[in-house]
Image (cartoon, rainbow, N blue to C red):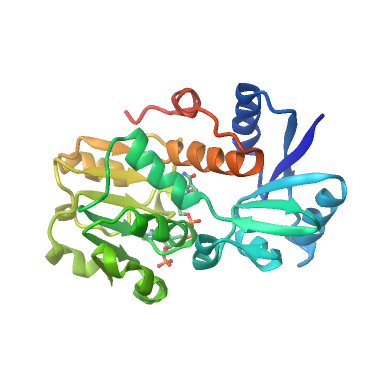
Amino acid sequence: MGDRYAVIGNPIGHTKSPLIHGFFAQETGQDMSYKAIEGPVEPASGFSDSVRSFIAAGGRGMNVTAPFKLEAFAMSDERSERAELSGAVNAMKFENGRIIAENFDGVGLVRDIEVNLHQPMAGKRVLILGAGGAARGALLPFVAARPAELVVTNRHVDKARALVEQVARPLTAAGSLIACGYADLEAMGRFDLVINATSASLTGQLPPVPPSVFSASGSAYELAYGKGLTPFLRLARNAGVQGIADGVGMLVEQAAEAFAWWRGIRPETRTLIDRLTVPLD
Ligand code: NDP
């Protein structure tokens, strides 16, 4: 059976992680297993009990998905800077009785945009919609990509402000980092890249973003995946944006980061992204 890994979430039936990591393991010749665990939401200790029993059974690492990313943060012994800033953990490694925690969502997203979609962010105007877990995880890797301007917008604008204030220090060399409400966007001109990091698409909704933010020569990226042309991507396309993409590449890239962290070898991702892609039209 080899070394044991798992993803934990609730619900977990939809997860593609066992398929992805099974593919990576085969491709890189790693002797390991990877399964999905439905973590109990009740009692309050249900999540940490599940993690500890997985460790006791010889588990080496875990991915963490909704709704447990904050609980994984709370129970970890060591956290990376990006996990620390995002306040959320999506990967854990168990070593010498300690739980080491990471958040690869943001690096996976940046890698998909810059490497797979050939859209370097350096010097560009970038707009992130949403200030939830995914946006928080993305912020440090985005800052590291050195856009000229990074704007974070949220319905509850205080959340966007709090997030921006948290990273204000490491950002100084990278250009301006701004938090604002949706109502302010009309006056802010066009962006080279607009990212929907809200969960609106999961319920078929559209965040209240004005079409004026899109640039025909720019790109629009939807974090949700497997949903075809979401209302956000449709708005972007109607505004003339040619470069549109959903989050399937992010999903595979964050998994590849976790795999490399656990196993010391980075798998190839293109084949899997192509296989999992649901056409946007
Ligand atoms: P959270 O629940 O942490 O945050 C939700 C965010 O969406 C908040 O900023 C919330 O705003 C905003 N929001 C929700 N509904 C609306 C709406 N109708 N209009 C405007 N804003 C809205 O979710 P996550 O950050 O964890 O996930 C966000 C998205 O990213 C989801 O679609 C998820 O599937 C996707 N995702 C994709 C991944 C991938 O690998 N591709 C990985 C992780 C997430 P407010 O605070 O004002 O309520």
Image location of residue 210, percent across then percent down: 20, 57
The answer to whether 21 is drawn above or below residue 200 in the figure is above
Q: Is residue 200 left or right of residue 188?
A: right
Report whether 128 appears left or right of 274.
left
Q: Is residue 143 above or below residue 178?
A: above
Quadrant of the rendered image holding ligand 1: bottom left
Left or right of 136, for residue 164: left
Residue at left 44%, top 54%?
A: 199
Query: Looking at the rendering, in which quadrant would you find the N terminus?
Result: top right
Q: Is residue 34 visible?
A: yes
Residue 164 at x, y = what percent? 36, 71
Residue shown at the point (80%, 31%) measured from the top left? 2
Q: Position of residue 271 (x, y in %)?
A: 48, 22
Q: Quadrant of residue 187?
A: bottom left
Counting labels gives: 0
Picture coordinates of residue 69 (x, y %)? 61, 59
Task: Tell which of 253 and 28 is nearer to you.
Answer: 28
Q: Nearer the viewer, residue 153 or 58?
A: 58
Q: Is residue 164 visible?
A: no
Image check: 207 left or right of 256?
A: left
Residue 177, placed above or below residue 9: below
Q: Quadrant of residue 259?
A: top right
What residue sits 50% from the left and 26% below the top?
A: 272
Q: Quadrant of the C terminus?
A: top left
Residue depicted at x 38% and y 27% = 279
